[in-house]
Structure formats: C-alpha cells, structure tokens
Image (cartoon, rainbow, N blue to C red):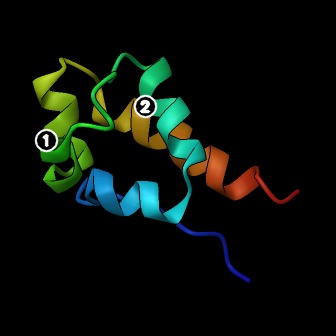
C-alpha cells in the first residue's frame, strides 16, 4: 500500500481522518487548536498562515511521519 501524502491544500480535518498521529505533529509545531471545529475546514497552508508557521516545514514533518510510520 502506498504511503498517504498531504499537501498544503489538504484540510486539517482530512489529515486527522488519515492519521490521528498528525495531531501531535501539529501541536508540537504550536498549532494547539487542532480540535477546534473551524480548524477542520482550514487547509494546512491557511492554518500555518494564521499561526505564523512555515507551511513547507510543517508539511515536510507530516509527510516524513506518514512515509515512515509503517517501516
């Protein structure tokens, strides 16, 4: 099975449905509102912009996690 991949356009809610482990990555990056209902409808890029984060950096951490979680 191919590893799942997240893009900057992936909604926070979609990511959390893929794998709840992503919540820990987002929270460690400083995005503590992952349980907020409005965050579920924000893209990763939008959420990072609101929180002053580098979307490419957070995206890299998420995709590294997804690629390596079953190794």
Residue drawn at point x = 25 percent, y = 57 percent:
11
Task: Provide the secondary structure element on which disc 1 rests.
Answer: helix
Furthest residue to the bottom? 1
On screen, residue 7 above or below 37: below
On screen, residue 2 above or below 59: below
The answer to whether residue 6 shows anywhere in this view is: no
CB atoms at circles 1 and 2 under 8 Å apart?
A: no
Disc 1 to disc 2, how far (Cα)? Answer: 13 Å
Q: Position of residue 63 (x, y in %)?
A: 55, 50
Furthest residue to the right? 71
Task: Provide the secondary structure element on which disc 2 rests.
Answer: helix
The answer to whether residue 65 shows anywhere in this view is: yes
Q: Quadrant of the C terminus?
A: bottom right
Q: Position of residue 29 (x, y in %)?
A: 43, 20
**Side (left or right) of 14 relative to 44:** right
Residue labelled with disc 2: 26
Q: Residue 31: which quarter of the image? A: top left
Residue drawn at point x = 22 percent, y = 37 percent:
36
Q: Look at discs 1 and 2 and give the one toward the viewer.
A: 2
Name the foreground residue: 62 vs 33: 33
Residue labelled with disc 1: 46
Indicate which disc, 1 or 2, sits on the residue closer to the N terminus.
Answer: 2
* Number of residues whose C-alpha sits closer than 10 Å to that of mark 1, classed few (under 14), some (14–19) or many (20 or more): some
């Amino acid at each position: 099975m191919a590893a799942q991949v997240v893009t900057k356009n992936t909604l926070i809610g979609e990511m959390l449905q893929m794998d709840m482990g992503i919540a820990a990555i987002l929270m460690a990056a400083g995005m503590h509102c992952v349980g907020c209902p409005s965050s579920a409808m924000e893209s990763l890029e939008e959420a990072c912009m609101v929180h002053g984060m580098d979307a490419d950096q957070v995206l890299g951490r998420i995709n590294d996690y997804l690629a390596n979680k079953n190794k």
